[in-house]
Image (cartoon, helix red, strand yellow):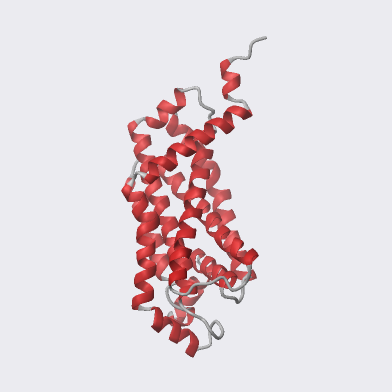
Amino acid sequence: MTTLPAARERSPRALVAHTLILTQRLLVRWSRDPMTLAQSLVLPALLLIMLNLALGNQITRYAVDHNLYGPGYDSIYGTVPMAALVGIMAGSVAGAISLGRERETGLLSRFWVLPVHRSSGLIARVLAEGMRIFVGTVMIVIVGYLFGFRFEQGPLAALAYVTLPVLFGLAFATVITTIAVRTAKASLIELVSLASSVLTFFSTGFVPLDAFPEFLRGVVTYQPLTTTVDAMRGLSFGGPVAKPLLVTLIWCFGSILVFAIPAAQGYRKASRR
């Protein structure tokens, strides 16, 4: 009995093959898009360089004088994770804008009528985001090494260090993808970008917690950028890891649980238009 083409399109083999092809398409497209490259790699690296040249010594001195993170601390252990997270969020915003354009021009609809596995498009975006985030994090760490950044806690902690931003980025990408496929208003994506910028400067990656006004410290302590930066600081330099890591995982998995189904439904609806 001959297998129907529709059945072959839904097979596991088709899912793997089509996902790899679409992942390659996204990676090639992003690598040729100046906006995505600038927001994912160039701007975070420049932010890291400027912060350390302009404020690095002052932040380090403040932390040492107040004995915040222990002897030998340098502000680079806070600015490297912050710059990596900035690149992650900016790159996801650029990807969401690109997804919105594909939605408006009908490219998603064209993929829908092709003999392509229905789940491959969204899975390919997840894989491509993960690869982009990992490469961006490694690039920021390399720049940080030029300013004295080192992994002081061993190889396992270093592996966890570069893995945590991937989880954070996938959670953020899930939220921004949900917005991109469910609304035609680019202003909402820009609003999320603005909110993430505000959170960046109200995090411990920018200045130590004690430098914030007392009435803001509760918000700063438990917002996702702070907990991720604190966990990454502990994994690289040393210090508390368990609590900030736990809160970060709650933020990430909570966001994925809340937004994953709406993102999948919205992507399917946008593809069928």
Estimate the x, y position of residue 216 in percent, counting from the top left: 45, 76
In the rendered view, tell whether residue 214 sits above or below residue 198: below
Callout count: 0
Q: Residue furthest top?
A: 1
Which residue is at a point 48% across and 66% down the rendered structure image? 81
In the figure, is residue 102 to the left or right of 121? Answer: left
Estimate the x, y position of residue 195 in percent, counting from the top left: 39, 60
Q: Residue furthest bottom?
A: 65
Which residue is at a point 42% across and 71% down the rendered structure image? 202
Question: Is residue 84 visible from the viewing direction of this image?
Answer: yes
| Frontmost residue, 235 versus 268 | 235
In the figure, is residue 42 to the left or right of 2? Answer: left
Estimate the x, y position of residue 114 in percent, counting from the top left: 46, 23
| Frontmost residue, 195 versus 107 | 107
| Frontmost residue, 167 versus 198 | 167
Which residue is at a point 47% across and 38% down the rendered structure image? 24
Estimate the x, y position of residue 180 in percent, counting from the top left: 40, 43
Position of the C terminus by quadrant: top left
In the rendered view, tell whether residue 82 sits above or below residue 193: below
